[in-house]
């Protein structure tokens, strides 16, 4: 076993510590579904009912059910509703704050309220008041997924979307999963959708191939959320040695012409490993207009490929790169070839290698694309 392996924290131990920290501070828990009818609302109400049975003060703030509302919401307090409960209840944030329960349940965080904004934007006020929020969200309500599937579904999103960065506020994100085949069977047997709605949906978002792709997208959302939480925990705990949660590949590019192929090849290499991909440039001087045009093109290409483009500034290219690599917890770094015929102390490549540990460094040969 290498010294690098010995330096890494035990993955199980890290997960136990994350779990312990999470149990102490969970205020925002969300159930994620990849299609209509998977059961996110049912999972939400079941959790509310379980907590209420244990003595927790729980209220339902907003919901939409397809069956008998009286049966679906049995044994639960619905804010603002009497005995005859409607099939849908909108969120009244001021009423929730005035009621001040321990837990409030909000169905469909992307549902727009009277002001046109998604319910998610009201959650911060509830969390600030110390109220635990249980909620649901659909994968197609998340901006990146909705954008990716717009051409597949043949339509643009018809309501406000949740920005991916907003997911960082969620303490626990749980996928409510069911296989596409079982989901289609459920939709045919239960009246989740009307016959007309089901007939249309079977040609669009409920096609078997589309459901499989949506389910995969939901798994990816869950994996990325867990990845962010672990990385955040590692930073807070000041874990010095990078520990690969998900690969992070960084390509460093200078202000030179014709590096598009290198960026594409590096992205393909990262995609093959399901790793996150970033392109980094370091400015130590004022760029010429021509150089700015090149770098702008590289940034646009990187974003088009789904990666991150980062501009760094510093007196030393090596120092700026090393600081970024440590901060981003990169696992692999790709550097361009050296111009010198031999290694010299203090040059960028040798300095980066000297100062990095636990990170794989790839050095391209002269004339090598990636």
Image: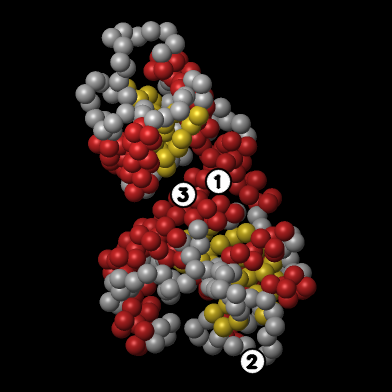
Q: Residue at x 68, y 85 (%)?
A: 81
Q: In the image, residue 25 lies at what x, y percent?
A: 68, 51
Quarter of the picture holding the C terminus: top left
Residue at 44% x, 15% y: name it: 351
- Residue pointed to by mark 2: 84
Determine whether the residue tagged by mark 1 lies in a helix, strand or loop.
helix
Count of numbered circles on the image: 3
Q: CA distance from mark 2 to mark 1?
A: 42 Å
| Viewer-proximal residue among 250 and 180 | 250
The residue beneath circle 3 is 224
Q: How many residues crowd around disc 1 within 10 Å: few (fewer than 14), some, or many (20 or more)?
A: some
Secondary element under disc 2, as helix, strand or loop, is: loop
Question: Where residue 84 sits in the image (x, y, percent)?
Answer: 64, 92
Hey, which residue is sitting farthest bottom in the picture? 84
Residue at the image position 75 percent from the left and 70 percent from the top: 97
Is the residue marked by circle 3 packed among few (<14), some (14-19), or many (20+) residues within 10 Å? some
Please report the residue visible at 41 percent of the width from the left and 70 percent of the height from the top.
Answer: 157
> How far, Cα to Cα, is label 2 from label 3?
41 Å
Look at mark 1 in the image and give the residue it sits on.
229
């Amino acid at each position: 076993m290498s010294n690098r392996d010995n330096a890494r924290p035990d993955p199980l131990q890290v997960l136990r510590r994350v779990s312990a920290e999470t149990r102490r501070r969970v205020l925002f828990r969300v159930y994620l579904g990849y299609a209509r009818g998977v059961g996110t609302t049912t999972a939400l109400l079941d959790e509310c009912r379980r907590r209420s049975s244990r003595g927790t003060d729980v209220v339902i703030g907003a919901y939409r059910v397809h069956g008998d509302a009286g049966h679906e919401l049995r044994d639960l307090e619905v804010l603002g509703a009497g005995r005859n409960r409607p099939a849908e209840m909108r969120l009244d944030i001021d009423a929730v704050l005035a009621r001040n329960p321990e837990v409030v349940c909000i169905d469909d965080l992307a549902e727009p309220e009277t002001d046109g904004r998604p319910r998610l934007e009201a959650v911060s006020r509830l969390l600030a008041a110390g109220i635990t929020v249980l909620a649901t969200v659909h994968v197609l309500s998340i901006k990146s997924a909705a954008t990716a599937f717009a051409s597949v579904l043949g339509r643009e999103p018809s309501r406000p979307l949740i920005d991916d960065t907003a997911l960082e506020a969620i303490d626990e994100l749980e996928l409510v999963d069911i296989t596409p085949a079982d989901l289609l069977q459920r939709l045919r047997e239960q009246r989740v959708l009307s016959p007309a709605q089901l007939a249309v949906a079977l040609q669009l978002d409920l096609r078997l191939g589309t459901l499989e792709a949506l389910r995969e997208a939901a798994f990816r959302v869950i994996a990325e959320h867990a990845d962010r939480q672990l990385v955040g925990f590692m930073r807070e705990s000041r874990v010095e040695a990078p520990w690969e949660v998900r690969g992070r590949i960084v390509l460093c590019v200078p202000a030179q012409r014709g590096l598009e192929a290198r960026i594409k090849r590096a992205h393909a290499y990262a995609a093959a490993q399901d790793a996150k991909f970033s392109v980094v440039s370091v400015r130590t001087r004022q760029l010429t207009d021509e150089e700015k045009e090149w770098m702008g093109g590289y940034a646009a290409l990187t974003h088009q490929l789904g990666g991150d483009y980062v501009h760094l500034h510093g007196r030393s290219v090596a120092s700026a790169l090393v600081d970024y690599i440590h901060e981003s917890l990169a696992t692999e770094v790709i550097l361009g070839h050296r111009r010198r015929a031999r290694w010299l102390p203090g040059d960028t490549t040798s300095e980066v290698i000297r100062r990095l540990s636990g990170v794989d460094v790839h050095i391209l040969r002269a004339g090598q694309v990636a």
